Image: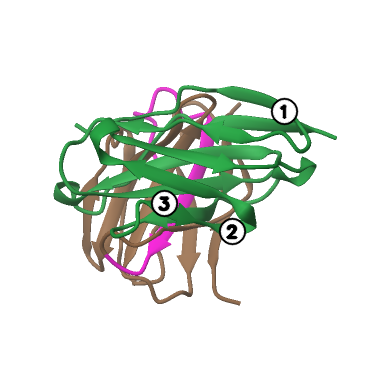
Chain colours: A brown, B green
Amino acid sequence: DGGITQSPKYLFRKEGQNVTLSCEQNLNHDAMYWYRQDPGQGLRLIYYSQIVNDFQKGDIAEGYSVSREKKESFPLTVTSAQKNPTAFYLCASSQGTFQPQHFGDGTRLSIL
Amino acid sequence: AQSVSQHNHHVILSEAASLELGCNYSYGGTVNLFWYVQYPGQHLQLLLKYFSGDPLVKGIKGFEAEFIKSKFSFNLRKPSVQWSDTAEYFCAVNAHNAGNMLTFGGGTRLMVKP
């Protein structure tokens, strides 16, 4: 079945540590996205990529970094510069501009 | 910057009651509009979408939404809810001059009592 796989499902980070969240899709979609979901705030866009080797900042990119070396993969690194990283992170992909987005199951990140 | 408002954060209904969830957005140009649903323990999935044409769009599971351009609204409706509709609902807007960026509302948690 085609879809989006996010791993791990739960992740714990120590203060000052960088962590990388994985997102893989086998839908052959060009565009991929990372969102952060906090209670009562909906989803906020962190980064998105419309094509391999290209990505743009979203509304809350500070403290995060991404790469898009392969079409099917869009990893997100939460750096130590992100002061409030505890959240639920969702990865999505879409076939093209303005098309509906398909979501993964998410990764819940907590700080120890 | 575009913004999306969902006025009801929590809604509690009994089965068979009618549902209307409000969604308003701030952008004045051409938009695509979406409603997504997140059932407990499941990933976000598309409920319905509006791109152009008939402003009344029908989605899965008996849901529909009406795009009223003059009111910048895209309210979600269902005439008779079921217990299985318990979920969180998100309205989202894609403004055509904002590239591929989707702006989400804060979500509405719906609880349907059996």
The amino acid type, in three-letter code, at marker 3 is: Leu
Q: Is residue B42 visible?
A: yes
Give the vertical position of A20 relative to B105 (above or below): below
Q: Chain of mark 2?
A: B
| Picture coordinates of residue B100, whole percent (x, y) | 25, 54
| Secondary-structure class at tag 1 | strand
Q: Is residue B23 left or right of residue B100?
A: right
Q: Is residue A101 left or right of residue B14?
A: left
The label on residue B13 is: 1
Q: Which residue is mark 3?
A: B56
Q: Rounded to the nearest whole Å, what is the CA distance between mark 1 and mark 3?
A: 24 Å
Query: Which residues lie in the magenta part?
Result: A76-96
Q: Which mark is in front, 1 or 3?
A: 3
Crowd rating for badge 3 (residues with CA inside 10 Å; few <14, some 14–19, many 20+): few
Q: Give the quarter of the figure containing the N terminus of chain A.
A: bottom right
| Picture coordinates of residue B106, whole percent (x, y) | 46, 29
Give the vertical position of B102 relative to A60 (above or below): below
Looking at the image, which is closer to me, B36 or A49? Answer: B36
For the residues labelled 2 and 3, say whether their Cβ atoms are less than 8 Å apart. no
**Residue found 41% across the figure and 49% down from its top:** B34
- In the picture, residue B82 is in which quadrant? top right
The label on residue B60 is: 2
Q: Rounded to the nearest whole Å, what is the CA distance between mark 1 and mark 2?
A: 20 Å
**Residue found 50% across the figure and 56% down from its top:** B58
**Residue found 70% across the figure and 46% down from its top:** B41
